[in-house]
Image (cartoon, helix red, strand yellow):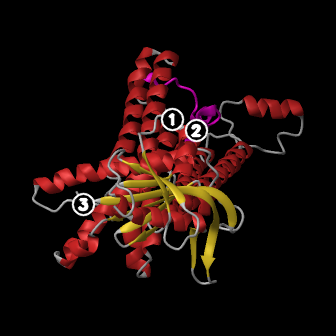
Amino acid sequence: MNRQPDTAARLWQRRGPRTRLEARIHRAIADEEQRGLVFAFRARLVAVLAVMLWLVLAIEPERQVYYLSVSLLLLLLGVVPYLLRRHRYAVPLRLAFVLLDAILVTAVVILPPPGHIDSGFPIQMRVRGPEFLYLILLIVGAALSYSPLQVIWTGFCAVAAWGTGVLLVLLRPDTLPYDPVQAESSQALLGMIVDPHFVSIFTLMNQMVLAVIATAILAAAVWRSRRMLLRQTRAEIARADLARYVSPDVADAIIASERPFGVPTTREVAILFADIVGFTAMSEQLPPDRVVRLLKSFHERGSRVVFGHGGSLDKYMGDGFLATFGAIAAAPDSAARALRCAVDLQAEIDRWNAKRAARGADTVRLSVGVHCGPVVVGNIGGDRRLEFTVLGDTVNITSRLEALTRELDCRIAVSAACLATARDSAPDLPAFAAAGAVHLPGRQQSVEVCVWPAGTAAKPGQ
C-alpha cells in the first residue's frame, strides 16, 4: 500500500522550503486530522449499529434483512476510506466515498424495497417522511473528521443527491405538484396535501436551505477548531523550542505573560553554582569530540535534577552552570529546594561515576555552592539581545562558595544563613558541618559557611 506523504511534505513540494517550525506545525495538524478520521469512523460504527438496533425494533421481520443489509453496506463504505486513510490518494478517495454514502442513503429512502416487502404505497410518499434526517447525520458525522472541506463536500453531496432524487419524483407523470389554481380554498389545499401522490417543492426547498445552513455552521465550527488547534500547536512548539534555550519555567512564563516579561525586580532567591573540578586538566587529555560528549552528558544530568526540584537553569558556563530557585515566582521553600537539589546532584554524579569507572573512564568530581538572599531578577542586555538572569551580591557569594569547596575539601558549601532558612521548611535535610566564618575573595565581611558531607571539611588555609 502506498503511504500518503504528510501535509508538511506536500506543502514543501508545492511552495518551496519552509521553516522547521512551520513544518512541525503542519505535521501536527496532519496528525490531528488522522486522529479525527479514526474518531469519525468509530462514531460512524456506533451510529450504524444504533440504526441497526432501531430497525430490528421498529420494522417487521420480513423487511429487516433488506434494511440491515443496507446498513452493513453503509458501514462498508466507511471501512474502505478508513483503511486507505494514509494512501497517497486518500483525500479524493474519501470524498468519493462520501458521494457514494449520500447516493446510497437517498436511494434507500426514495426507492421502494424489492419484491414482496414493498408496502405498495406510492413512491411520492417516501419523500414526505423524516428520513431526510439520515443525510443530516452524514453531515454531522463529517464534522468529526476535523476537515472543513469534508464537511462542505458532505453537505453538497447530501443536498445534490436528495435534491436530484426528489426532482425525479416530481417529474413523474403520476406526481401531483402544488398548483396555486387548485389550492384557492383551504379545503382544496388540504385535499391536495393529503393526496398520496402529492409532492411539495416548498418542502424540498426548506430541506435544502436547512441542510446548507447546517453545513455552513458545522464547517465554520470545524474551521474555528482548527484555528484554535493551530494556535495551541504553534504555542506548544514555540514553547518546546524556547525551552531548549531557556529554562522550561522561563519559557512558560514568557508565553503565558500578558505583560512585558522580565521587568527587573528584587526578589529573595536561592542560587546554586555547580562546576566540574579539574575539568581543564581533564579536557587536555581528551579529544574535542569526547569533551563535547562529556559536557553534554553532564548538562543533561544536571538539568534533569535541577528541573526535578523546580529550579531554573540560568546559564551554562562551560563545565558548570548557575541554577536559581524562586526567580520566576516567589517560593518560601526555595532554599530547601536548592539544597536538596545540591545533594541530589552529587548522588547523580556518583551514579554517573559508577558507570564511567565500569568502562575505564576517569571519574568526575562536582563542586557546588549554595546561598540565598535578595537579587535583581529580570532582563539585561540591549534592544536586540536580552538575557533573563539574576544579579547581585547573593550571586557573587554563591560563586565564591563554589570555589571554596576546593579549599575546604568538601562537595557542597552553603552559607549558614541559607542552611538555617532551608531547615525552617525542610528539617529533614542531611547533616552539614560548620566550617566557621570565612573571608571570601573580593568581600570585606566574612560569611558563616557549612559543608557537606559533614566531617570532611578542613579549615581554610590548613
For this orientation, the residue located farthest to the right is 185
Q: Where does the magenta region start and end?
A: 117-135
Q: Mark 2 points at which residue?
A: 424
User: What kind of residue is marked 2?
Assistant: Asp
Relative to residue 228, is residue 278 depicted above or below? below
Q: Do the residues labelled 2 and 1 touch (CB within 8 Å)?
A: yes
Does residue 128 show up magenta in the picture? yes
Determine crowd level at label 3: few under 14, some 14-19, many 20+ residues with C-alpha closer than 10 A. Answer: some
Asked if residue 306 lies left or right of residue 180, the reply is: left
Q: Mark 3 points at which residue?
A: 364
Tag in front: 3 or 1? 1
Q: Are marks 2 and 3 in contact (CB under 8 Å)?
A: no
- State the mark number for residue 2: none
Q: Name the residue under label 1.
A: 427
The percent coordinates of residue 231 (x first, y second) are: 58, 61
User: What kind of residue is marked 3?
Assistant: Val
- Let me know if residue 213 appears in the view: yes
Tag in front: 2 or 3? 2
